[in-house]
Amino acid sequence: MTFDFLEYAIFAVLAVAVIGGGAMVVLLGRITSAALFMAMTFLAVAGMFVLLGAETLAAFQVLIYVGAITVLILYGVMFTPQSAREYALFFQKQTPWAAVFVGLVALPVLLFAFQFRDGRPLPRGGDLVPLATSLFGDFAFPFEVASVLLLAALVGAIVLVKRDEEEDA
Amino acid sequence: MEGGVPLGAYIAVSAALFFIGCAGVLMRRNAVVILMCVELMLNAANLALVAFSRRYGSVDERGSVFVTFVFVVAAAEVAVGLAIVLSAYRTRPVVDVDEARAMRG
């Protein structure tokens, strides 16, 4: 294949977008910018899903994460005032311990991650039919439980933010 | 699918994203940012699940089914989490998790 390098190039761009966007979410002081970088990270992960051949999950990812969750987070940012204290990521007491802990765990895991070798790949073709066959066949009961969980979360969110003192309104 | 990007590269990106989110949860103090970092960690787990599912070739896509359930749980989690942040902010105008010590013994 003459275009084989293209997959590597796209993967490199997506990997830079994923890791850079994630780092920006952690490092940026402005919460709105962090939320938008989080959306960029989600989009890059959706691109990786496409590269892996999971197009349906990529569509779900764009719909749910980039669409719903980012908008929800942006609403949360707008409803809460920002920076009661000044932004000081590197001058607080948790930072050294967090850096030591994450560094100690992350380095062996990152080295170990490259040990994985490819197994038997799937035949080319969409993932919609096998996904739907599993989801509505073997996993039909967990699917229904998930719908109940979503309903409970919806009702719980409404109850949590309901104002009690303004019942007359 | 001979050649192509090796599985280890996807797993390494997933691990890196997970630990970035983990560092964010441990270091940031804004509750909304902590929620965003938890979403990053869930997304990293999704990436690892999809990579293993596609490259180790179970024909019925069990990994993708798990990813679908992670989507559902993540949506429920962020909705309830933001509701808790908003209601805590209404009780006392504080978004900083260091200041939220009403339940400390």
Image (tube, coloured by chain):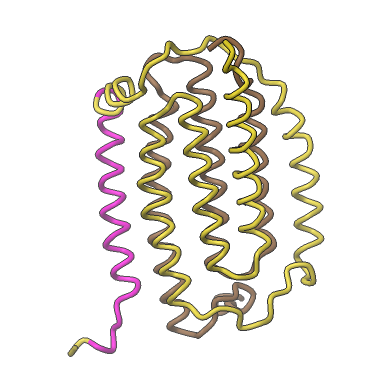
Tell which of B103 and A26 is nearer to you. Answer: A26
Q: In this view, does A164 lie above or below B75?
A: below
Query: Is the magenta region chiefly helix, strand or loop?
Result: helix
**Residue A5: percent from the left, percent from the top?**
63, 21
Give the brown chain's letter: B
Residue B48 position by quadrant? top right
Residue appearing at x 36%, y 38% in the figure: A59
Residue A166 position by quadrant? bottom left
Residue appearing at x 30%, y 82% in the figure: A163
**Residue A25: percent from the left, percent from the top?**
61, 58
Tell which of B80 and B7 is nearer to you. Answer: B7
Residue appearing at x 66%, y 28% in the figure: B9
Q: Is residue A121 above or below residue B52?
A: above
Q: In the visual, does A62 lie left or right of B43?
A: left
Q: Give the range drawn in magenta.
A: A137-166
Q: In which quarter of the image is the C terminus of chain A?
A: bottom left
Q: How many marks are shown on the rendered structure?
A: 0
Asked whether B85 falls inside the magenta stretch, the response is no
Q: In the visual, does B11 lie left or right of A122?
A: right
Asked whether A154 falls inside the magenta stretch, the response is yes
Q: Is residue B19 above or below residue A52?
A: below
Q: In this view, does B63 lie above or below A22?
A: above
Q: Which residue lies furthest to the front in this view?
A: A2
| The colour assigned to chain A within the rendered structure | yellow
**Residue A8: percent from the left, percent from the top?**
63, 25
**Residue B42: percent from the left, percent from the top?**
52, 45
